[in-house]
């Protein structure tokens, strides 16, 4: 049960299915070419998808809240494998795999000096991001917030920890403000929930319920 609603002013999504070698651009997500080439060439797929979403919806002075269960675990695994092999580590890969890399890169490209933060709450990470946004809005710290969510399938070595096998990489950005009560979308967990939310937004939904119940995070 939600404690309040957030209104979605704008949204953007990128869905990448590596198995099918396909990409779906949703809402106002920008094309890869819109990202400056110098940064784009060094960005892993995970960060690039998230940045493309943030660029599509951010407005001047917007605060960013990044939500992800595992972050860019694929890039982190590559660095671990390089350590085991006694290879040189890529500084670009290291900087891109820290948990708040995506919002930092987005802010850099957008020239934003407002704050950004990163949260993780298991399968309910998107809910946690929306809750963080609601708290900032109700505290008067911002008039609108961009909630940026990104999650990807786990590498094969960690497959047992992927509770959504077959669900592709999902990046989603939501520019939200406080809203009155009304019929609102209740989120499901994980990448599946983010994909379902995109469908709801495509169908005209504008309100999302904010839930304080993150007990399903494990």
Image (spheres, rainbow, N blue to C red):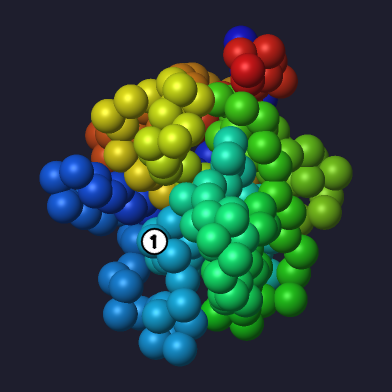
- Rate crowding at label 1 as few (under 14), some (14 to 19) or many (20 or more) other CA atoms within 10 Å: some
Depth check: 46 or 173 in front? 46
Q: Residue at x 51, y 30 (%)?
A: 208
User: How far from the left and from the top, in percent, is residue 90?
Assistant: 57, 74
Q: Is residue 123 left or right of residue 215?
A: left
Local secondary structure at mark 1: helix
Residue 87 lies, with reference to residue 204, above or below; the image says below
Quarter of the view holding residue 181? top right
Depth check: 33 or 141 in front? 33
User: How far from the left and from the top, in percent, is residue 105?
Assistant: 58, 71
Residue 90 lies, with reference to residue 21, above or below; the image says below
Q: Residue at x 70, y 42 (%)?
A: 119
Quarter of the view holding residue 103? bottom right
Q: Mark 1 — residue?
A: 45
User: How far from the left and from the top, in percent, is residue 132?
Assistant: 73, 39
User: How far from the left and from the top, in percent, is residue 94?
Assistant: 62, 67
């Amino acid at each position: 049960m939600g404690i309040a609603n957030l209104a979605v002013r704008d949204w953007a999504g990128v869905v990448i299915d590596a198995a099918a070698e396909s990409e779906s651009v949703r809402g106002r997500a920008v094309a890869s070419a819109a990202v400056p080439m110098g940064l784009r060439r060094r960005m892993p797929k995970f960060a690039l998808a998230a940045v493309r979403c943030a660029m599509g919806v951010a407005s001047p002075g917007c605060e960013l809240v990044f939500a992800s269960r595992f972050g860019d675990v694929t890039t982190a695994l590559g660095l671990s494998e390089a350590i085991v092999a006694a290879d040189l580590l890529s500084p670009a890969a290291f900087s891109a795999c820290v948990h708040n890399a995506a919002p930092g890169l987005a802010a850099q490209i957008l020239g934003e000096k407002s704050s950004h933060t990163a949260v993780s709450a298991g399968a309910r990470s998107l809910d946690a991001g929306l809750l963080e946004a609601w708290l900032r809005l109700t505290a008067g710290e911002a008039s609108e917030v961009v909630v940026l969510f990104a999650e990807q399938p786990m590498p094969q070595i960690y497959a047992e920890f992927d509770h959504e096998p077959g669900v592709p990489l999902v990046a989603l950005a939501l520019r939200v403000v406080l809203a009155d009560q009304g019929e609102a979308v209740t989120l499901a967990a994980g990448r599946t929930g983010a994909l379902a939310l995109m469908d709801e937004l495509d169908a005209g939904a504008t309100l999302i319920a904010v839930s304080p119940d993150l007990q399903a995070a494990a």
